[in-house]
Amino acid sequence: MNQEITIVKIGGAFLEDQILLESFYTSFSELKGRKILIHGGGQRASKLSRELGITPKMVDGRRITDVRSLEVVTMVYAGWANKKLVSGLQGQGCNALGLSGADADLIRARKRPVSEIDFGFVGDVERVQTTALIRLLDAGFTPVFCALTHDGNGQLLNTNADSIAASLAIALSASYSTKLIYCFEKEGVLRDVNDPESVISEIDRYAFEALRKSGDIATGMIPKLFNSFKALEEGVGQVCIGSVGLLSGNAPKFTQIIL
Amino acid sequence: MNQEITIVKIGGAFLEDQILLESFYTSFSELKGRKILIHGGGQRASKLSRELGITPKMVDGRRITDVRSLEVVTMVYAGWANKKLVSGLQGQGCNALGLSGADADLIRARKRPVSEIDFGFVGDVERVQTTALIRLLDAGFTPVFCALTHDGNGQLLNTNADSIAASLAIALSASYSTKLIYCFEKEGVLRDVNDPESVISEIDRYAFEALRKSGDIATGMIPKLFNSFKALEEGVGQVCIGSVGLLSGNAPKFTQIIL
């Protein structure tokens, strides 16, 4: 039986809500065993963009990332969000180490080819440098990843945080028994986006297809579920979506993804 | 004889000049042995501040860092500057790993006490976590530090990059033969700030005092020289101030600090 590792992705809403954030710091710090955190920061990036007179452009929930937008997300994700989380976790005794995919060449990505849409400096994960990552884990650090990668030739790339979380979980599944938790401000995937009580306890591919067809599911949830199924298919042991309560095992409700 | 390590601090001007930056990437990547980079980013931080309607306030070359200014420097130093350098160095095959003092609890600082001036969230280095830093060096990474530290209780602090460089060099002197290089866009400390040819080849404490009294020395150079003397007194083997040519040993002129 392999050693366990928990990969937690938190949404940007955590970063804007001090109460939610404090409860996250405690739960994540208390989480036993090896762990990795991945965070977003899109809300703040859009806010900063507007303050700088740059209109954020999104297509299917993905940011069109031109040179100036890349500067904005780099400042917000790797700077503001990452160091806020790292210092906050350090304050709780969790030995956090902030990272982007460029650091130690941990995550290489390929710039998304221009088709109908030119996403600009957006990258899709190509490979995770598992050896270096395990070296950091073995040294007792808790990696905290922001949603940036690089192409290995000097170019930073904006990469979806949900996809990074799934890629890390998949890459580590060869060495660890991996659990992937998508943690956000709701209790799980909702059958009815307007009813916070309507948490679906289990979703398999059939249920997902039915939800997609019905159009009831929140748009942002679709790539998260795609990533979840991909993770399970590629060796990740468990994938859950829900509130911060999932970290301490105190979530009354949550969504488990099953194949 | 201890193993050698080179600690290089670069000024913010490098980050704004693509030609200077490219030559730095090459020289730093080619530098043999263990090495650490420390960078500033003050120019860009002031630019971003103004764009956001925050007037930068400086006293003796140090930034008065209120909550909003701390957000700005965190975004610029740990985000924009750090990840630009890390991805650029990775593009040259240097295994850079970006860090702030909060990461892995590497550099703790104490918030500067309020006296005549309240510097806000500015910290003075209290201790370097040498064991963790050596672990990263041993793992084959090249640490790239931005000018941020933390107090260990969740608070990030803005800390002068020259001081961080000296603190790291001093802390590592117990384990390595250390060389500290302050690298900037000039060839060294100038006798006459208006004459780029007037590089002083050696400065000891007496020469420094004479320069200070004469008022001819650039203001920004004074804390750098204080840090240099402190470093030499506390075990650092060699301290030089000069151009990027210092890294490849090709600098026709530079300033060597001696006790």
Image (cartoon, coloured by chain):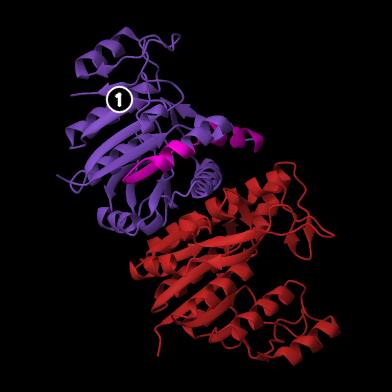
Chain colours: A purple, B red
Name the image quarter holding residue B224. bottom right
Is A227 situated left or right of B97 in this image? left
Q: Is A44 included in the stretch rendered in magenta?
A: yes
Residue A196: image x %, image y %?
44, 12
Q: Secondary structure at mark 1?
A: helix
Name the residue carrying label 1: A225
As displayed, is residue B27 above or below residue A169? below
Asked whether B125 or B183 is in front, the reply is B125
As displayed, is residue A173 above or below residue A17? below
Three-letter amino acid code at the position of disc 1: Leu
Which chain's residue wears label 1? A
Residue B245: image x %, image y %?
53, 80
Quick one: label 1, few (<14), some, or many (20+) residues within 10 Å?
Answer: many
Residue B167: image x %, image y %?
58, 72
Q: In the picture, which quadrant includes the N terminus of chain B?
A: bottom left
Asked whether B105 or A150 is in front, the reply is B105
Residue A197: image x %, image y %?
41, 10
Name the image quarter holding residue A117. top left
- Please give the range of residues in magenta: A25-52
